[in-house]
Image: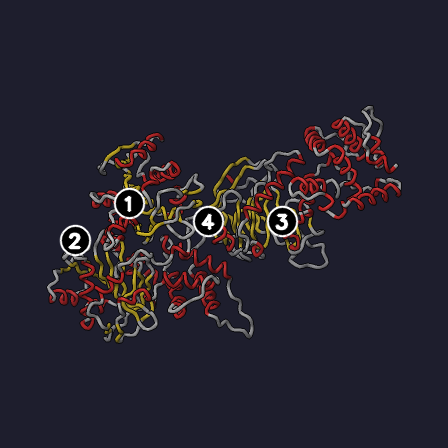
Amino acid sequence: MDCKAAYASLVEGLECFDFTGDSVPGRLVLIGGDAFPVAMTTNGDVLIAASRYGKGRMVVLSHEAYMKDPRFAKFIRNAVNWLKPSPGALVGVHSSLDSLATELSSTGTKVKLSKDYNAGMGVYCMDAYVDTQVAELVSFVKQGGGLLIGGQAWHWSYLHQTEDVFFSFNGNKITSVAGVYFTAEYGQTIVCPVRSEIPRSWLAVPNPRGVNHTTDYMRSLLNGVNDFNLECSSYPSHLLVHGPLAFSIAFDENQKIFVAGARYGKGRVIVVSHETYMSHPPIKTFILNAIRWLDAGKEGKIGLGKNLNDLCDLLKQEQFPCKFSDIKEECSVYCCQAYDDDQAENICEFVAEGGGLFIGGQAWYWAYNHAVAEYPGNKILNKLGISILGASIQNKMYKAPKAEDFEHFYHFRKALPKFVNHILGLKPLEEPESGWWKKLELDCRSFLEMKAYDSHAYTSIRQLLTDLVNRAGIPEFVTGSPIKTIESRFLLNLAGALSDTQPASARKLQVNGTNGGAEAWRSTGLSASPGQNVIIEVPSTLVSVGWQVQIGCQTDDLSNLEELRRPAVVTRRFAIDKERNPVSSLWGGLIYIIVPEGSRIGLVWITVEGAERSPYFIGGKTCPVEWVESIRYYPAPWAELEFENIILTVPSKHIRSMDDPHSLELLWNRIMKAVAELAATPGKFARPERIVADVQISAGWMHSGYPIMIQWGGIQDILDLQYIKANGTWGPIHELGHNQQKAAWNFPPYTGEATNNLWSVYVHEMVLDIPRHKAHSALAAEQRKATIQQYLCNGAKLEEWTVWTCLETYLQLQEGFGWEPFIKLFSEYQSKPGLSSNNTDKMLLWAERFSQQVQKNLFPFFKAWGWPVKESSLPEWSHNPMLKYT
């Protein structure tokens, strides 16, 4: 099952799950490779899950009330559609959920209200409190049906305190076959945002706290067992115990496990790491205990796979009913070696539906010439939470552990989050965890080498480990300073293991192929590593129609500069001239799809292979929790913050500690709205502006264009929310103003560095509440007065009418008439730009139009500033500020 696609279908159109209110959910626990969380709280509580069993599907909610709650109606519709084996399938609804039946019927779904599941239904919706049709419902799902079930087990557990909620609660008798369990623990009653990807959290990794019967299992298994005497000619392998319901039974002084057990579905598993020990006389007591525990009181037949003659003899001596048989024959316990995976699926289903599995084998011989990931036994056991590894253990006498010490035993899932918290400085290690780091280091590599890329249990932990390395960083070797700390060693080896087991990465993403503005860059959130080949696969409609791929965002060519702080050219473009396009750059960089002006292709899907993820925040889309937990730590060196009308590109180190990009987004949205207001352009830009930071740019401190380029020293002006609010951001708005200037009302060379500052003044006063005299020192009252006097003293020559002198003319008009005439004039120029490119004609037209806007004769005012203007019959401007200077 494609868990990612399933998750996307289930949460389509949703923004959050609201679990607030009187209904208290119970936490769900997930095991196996097919179950995945749909809703997860900040504490790591899984409150909605989905899974597959056989040919069918299952969706589990942590309280039945959510199935009738209007807040969950959209999700329930998504879930039912996903569960349907065919679009027109009949949906059965338990009679206790009549309001759900009404809701589904209102959407055109074929619904049948019934107190029982009936043949002919494609989906059945029920609560988790009845167990009258367990076998029928398990078979229904296995054959391709869909089950929607909701409930909580904390109340049941309170009433049945001596029973094991995992295996006795009614709902778990059904859902456990798909790897989903109701627990006795309360879940958080909060609002959970819907994440863009399947949610994950270190808080969900440890063994479930609600499993309180494992100590009892250990007492049964170790009853009368004082030691594990492995002395013989056979050498056992290590075992990796990684499932939430798996546990170690016997291990050496270094926590290397050679016997382990697990609960899976409704069944039980015991693994010994060499088949010899399935019938080894010195551990006979344990073997018999294991068979009894696996039988779980059924007193059924014991089936034996091939090559287990010694075990058959041992069991017959002890009066156990056993025979050589196929897994498909009816038995309560099945025993086999780990060297054949022909029956892997049948064995897993046998256990899930309540059978007991006794399996043995070693993998060290296999590992000489093969990858352990391909070991036959692991194709059975990985899903059950235990793996046989390629390293061996000494065949000697080992003391049996004490069942009451179980809580202190090493477990991969228990040790890993504790060590992560230690590395991140959240909580120091304590005993006995502080002595586990070498074991954990080896187990992390072994776990990653499983390469179970189709298992959510594997991929979720793999991604969490990747998040850890991204966040903590990879230690660097320094000459003369070897890496000594356990934290640095752990991170270094973990990074290597992640790299060694990295799957071929291919990411599908949607690109907006409609572009009403000039040529536009579409961000992908991906980055090409230096010198590494990346493949861009596109549909045939994009081939040879002007689309391009760009690697890198620092587009300034520095070839004309004397001193270089980076290579002169660091971006590359490639025409999309075939469906699969290999691209690369010596310098690497962010990957963009270039959409030509006027494109009307619409939304298209592309696939990018061989790229790494970059920190990428999209306003209104990126989940805040995902941003804080993982996205900001993605490894690429450049990050992007995409807001409504502007995209900011900065080195990733500048956003690693940014907890709340949404607040910055709100400010930039207001700024860009103000930019559009003054320019009299639509509030939604045809092409969002871009600001890109670079270590060196082609000219100045910043410069305009697409993108606007700024020096690294200017990053504070675009990212530091508190700094911007307190001090303003003159430079970036100055450059944005340049991008709004139009030739029809610009008079080069005079106004080039002046009229753009109208936007700086407007934004600072209208958005940041910073008056002009504080926004820039050149606009202090005394400085402005001196500027005017100096200009007039020199004869009011236009060649001196530049920058602050030029801006003063426009500021006087604004102070006399407000911003409205400017906005109306800028709008008028868009429809009537004027025909002449001559400055004299353009200045005269501006003077005439502004005079008409305010119905005042402004020609004396402009004449005082040295403009070539004529007379007007409009009323005089009695408050002309230039009168006091003449």
Q: Residues within 10 Å of mark 4 (few under 14, many from 20)?
A: some
Q: Residue at x 32, y 45 (%)?
A: 60
Q: Residue 737 in the image: x percent, y percent?
A: 69, 41
Which label number is shown at residue 507? 4
Q: CA distance from mark 4 to mark 3?
A: 30 Å
SS at mark 3 in the image:
helix
Q: Disc 1 designates what residue? A: 55
- Identify which residue is drawn at 61% across, 34% down: 682
Label 2 sits on residue = 329
Q: Which mark is on residue 751?
A: none
Residue 387 in percent (x, y) is at: 31, 62
Whole-angstrom CA distance, mark 4 to mark 2, is 44 Å
| Badge 4 or badge 1: first in the primary sequence | 1
Kind of residue sitting beneath label 2: Glu
Which amino acid, by three-letter code, is at mark 3?
Ile
Alpha-carbon distance for marks 3 and 2?
70 Å
Mark 3 or mark 2: name the one nearer the start of the chain.
Answer: 2
What sort of colour scheme is used for the picture?
A: secondary structure
Amino acid bearing label 1: Lys
User: Which of labels 3 and 2 is toward the front?
Assistant: 3
Q: Earlier in the sequence, mark 4 or mark 3?
A: 4
487 lies left or right of 778: left
Tag of residue 718 = 3
CB within 8 Å, label 4 to label 1: no
